[in-house]
Image: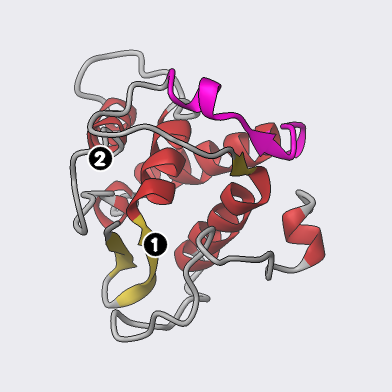
Amino acid sequence: MGTTFVRIGGRGFWMLDSVLELWLRLLALHVEDPVESGAPATKIRDQWLLASRGFFTGCVPEGLEAAVSTPEGDKLVREAIGSLMESLRSAPPHLSTGVLNLLGFVGGEFTTDIETWRLVEVGHAYLALLDGKVTSGPSDSSFMPGCQGAKHAAPDAVDGGA
């Protein structure tokens, strides 16, 4: 089971690859539909779909820093996160393995349901990183969003509050 450091510059947080890959796969589905080939939305979506395939271990190429390097990319990423978070608000408390395994991951399958709050926690961590509120570097693994054994995010974050 690998981990990847999600970063912007030297700031970021560690995540279990399986949770990161699921987050990226779902997030890619919430990127605004691109009108033309080669548009920023297409590049961001394609990067996230590649990164979420399931065959990177310890180095998932999540591409967040590149995706938000322009105002248009930053807007697209934030809108995708907002859209996914809105969908997670009405999602069941657990996402079933049967459905998750339909998403086209390579090299493994989900063997347990995923608790929805884990993905909500990842969304809040991504937004905090984008807003410059995450100051930890790669030497700090004290917080791994969506990867802890028990809920530890603020109650409003877990329940879908903004």
Q: Residue at x 32, y 66 (%)?
A: 7
Is residue 162 rendered to the left or right of residue 119?
A: right
Q: How is the image coloured?
A: secondary structure
Query: How many other residues sit within 10 Å of disc 2, few (<14), some (14-19) or many (≥20)?
Result: many
Q: Amino acid at mark 2?
A: Ala
Query: How many other residues sit within 10 Å of disc 1, few (<14), some (14-19) or many (≥20)?
Result: many
Nearer the camera: disc 1 or disc 2: 1
Closer to the chain start, of discs 1 and 2, is 1
Q: Which mark is residue 120?
A: none
Where is residue 22? Give x, y as percent: 43, 39
Find disc 1 in the rendering and name its residue: 15
Q: Amino acid at mark 1?
A: Met
Where is residue 76? Give x, y as percent: 44, 38
Is residue 74 rendered to the left or right of residue 148?
A: left
Q: Is residue 50 visible?
A: yes
Where is residue 37? Give x, y as percent: 22, 16
| Residue 123 colored in magenta in the image | no
Q: Residue at x 26, y 33 (%)?
A: 53
The quadrant of the rendering that contains the N terminus is bottom left
Report the span colored magenta.
Answer: 88-102
Element type at marker 2? helix
Q: Quadrant of residue 40?
A: top left
The quadrant of the rendering that contains the C terminus is bottom right
| Pick the front one: 72 or 115 | 115
| Pick the front one: 13 or 70 | 13
Q: Residue at x 52, y 76 (%)?
A: 133
Q: Is residue 162 visible?
A: no
Find disc 2 in the rendering and name its residue: 51
Q: Quadrant of residue 9?
A: bottom left
